[in-house]
Image (cartoon, rainbow, N blue to C red):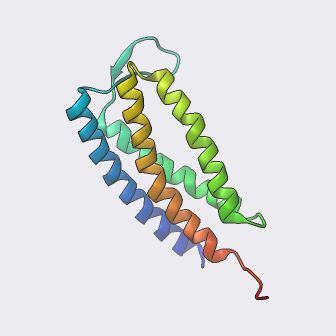
Amino acid sequence: MGADTLLRQAVVGTVAAVIAVAIVFLIGDAISGPLLAAQPGSDVSEEVPLGGALFSTVIGGVVGVVLALIAARTARPAQVFVTICVVLLVLYGVVAFAAADGVATGIWLNIMHLAAAIPIVGSLAGWLQTRQQVPAV
């Protein structure tokens, strides 16, 4: 299970995440109208662009690979990786609500984060699980 398998898992998870985020974005935009959020350090809300959401998803895939490589050095890599990702997802959920112009946007941003995290974290955790050697009893 080498780096080529990690790269393959990362690409599959990230492509699935990009598709899921695009679908959630379009549904949220159709139901709630434009998703408005302020950039860090700004008080002015702007429309969240679909391209920005998709680019952020790809960045999430890259960050996931880095975290998976770090977790691979631990005794329980899959569990460590998933724990780190869940903590970061919760923390970022708070940031999304703080940046959102309204509750609906905060909810849609968090749904998009889940739509991105599930395939990326799932595929990379699967890769880590196959690397984890469990001795036969």
Residue at 55%, 29% (x, y): give it: 94
| x, y percent for residue 6 | 54, 69
Residue at 24%, 40% (x, y): give it: 27
26 displayed left or right of 94: left
Can you tell which quarter of the image residue 15 is in?
bottom left
User: Farthest residue toward the top?
Assistant: 43
Q: Quadrant of the N terminus?
A: bottom right
Residue 41 lies, with reference to residue 83, above or below; the image says: above
Q: Kindly tell me whether residue 72 is visible in this rendering.
A: no
User: Farthest residue toward the front?
Assistant: 137
| x, y percent for residue 111 | 40, 41
User: Farthest residue toward the left?
Assistant: 30
Q: For this rendering, which residue is in front, 103 or 56?
A: 103
| x, y percent for residue 31 | 22, 32
Residue 53 lies, with reference to residue 46, above or below; the image says: below
116 displayed left or right of 129: left
Residue at 39%, 54% (x, y): give it: 17
Residue at 60%, 47% (x, y): give it: 86
User: Farthest residue toward the bottom?
Assistant: 136
Can you tell which quarter of the image residue 38 is in?
top left
Q: How many marks?
A: 0
| x, y percent for residue 71 | 70, 60
Q: Quadrant of the C terminus?
A: bottom right
Q: Kindly tell me whether residue 16 is visible in this rendering.
A: yes
